[in-house]
Image (tube, rainbow, N blue to C red):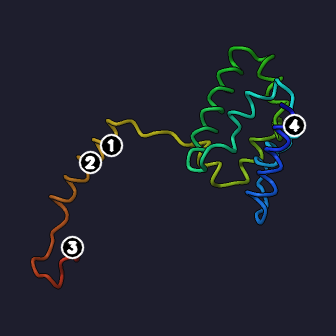
Amino acid sequence: MKNDMMACADIIEHCIYISLKPNLELVDLLFLLRNFKRRYYPLIRCHICHYPEVTLSAIYSRMYDYLSTLMIEDKAKYDVVVLQLPYGSDWVSRIVNNIHLLIVLWFKPVPPNTVKKLETKTRLFLSTSAHYKETVEALLDFR
């Protein structure tokens, strides 16, 4: 099986990504394939590089939620996991320097009843405060 994994790594690197520089996640997968051990198999099957980029943010958010729960339920296990992560001990300070990740970290969904209240206020404002002109030339003008 180890030879199969090495052949798979070679195909990925030398055929599929021959003209592209592989990203860090793919480099990690290639390392796991080349240094295959049976215990790596579940990690290889569900490795992060298999997922499309549009779903990565949701996956990272779900992992963050899992780690937050683990920190409360089993601090010792949480410490073992976090210390094995790259930048595990200072990831929050690194996120602060990246505006996009900071927005994801601090994102709070808006409750549905708040949306309804805003919609009602907006409709009230538009029906009482905005007076549209009736000519085509001034269609977008209002006071």
Q: Nearer the viewer, residue 94 or 47?
A: 47
Say which amino acid is labelled 1: Val
Choose top left, top right, bottom left or bottom right for residue 65: top right
Question: Residues at badges 2 and 1 in contact (C-beta under 8 Å)?
Answer: yes
Residue 110, how many percent across, how many down?
Answer: 42, 40
Between the C-alphas of marks 2 and 1, the distance is 6 Å
Between the C-alphas of marks 3 and 2, the distance is 20 Å
Between the C-alphas of marks 4 and 2, the distance is 61 Å
**Residue located farthest toward the left when viewing the structure as drawn:** 134
Q: Residues within 10 Å of mark 3 (few under 14, many from 20)?
A: few
Closer to the observer: label 3 or label 2? 2
Closer to the observer: label 4 or label 3? 4
Rendered-image quadrant of the N terminus: top right
Question: Residues at badges 4 and 2 in contact (C-beta under 8 Å)?
Answer: no
- Left or right: where does residue 116 sit relative to residue 58? left
- Left or right: where does residue 38 sit relative to residue 95? right
Q: Residues within 10 Å of mark 2 (few under 14, many from 20)?
A: few
Compare marks 1 and 4 and give the one earlier in the sequence. Answer: 4
**Residue located farthest toward the top when viewing the structure as drawn:** 73
Say which amino acid is labelled 4: Asn
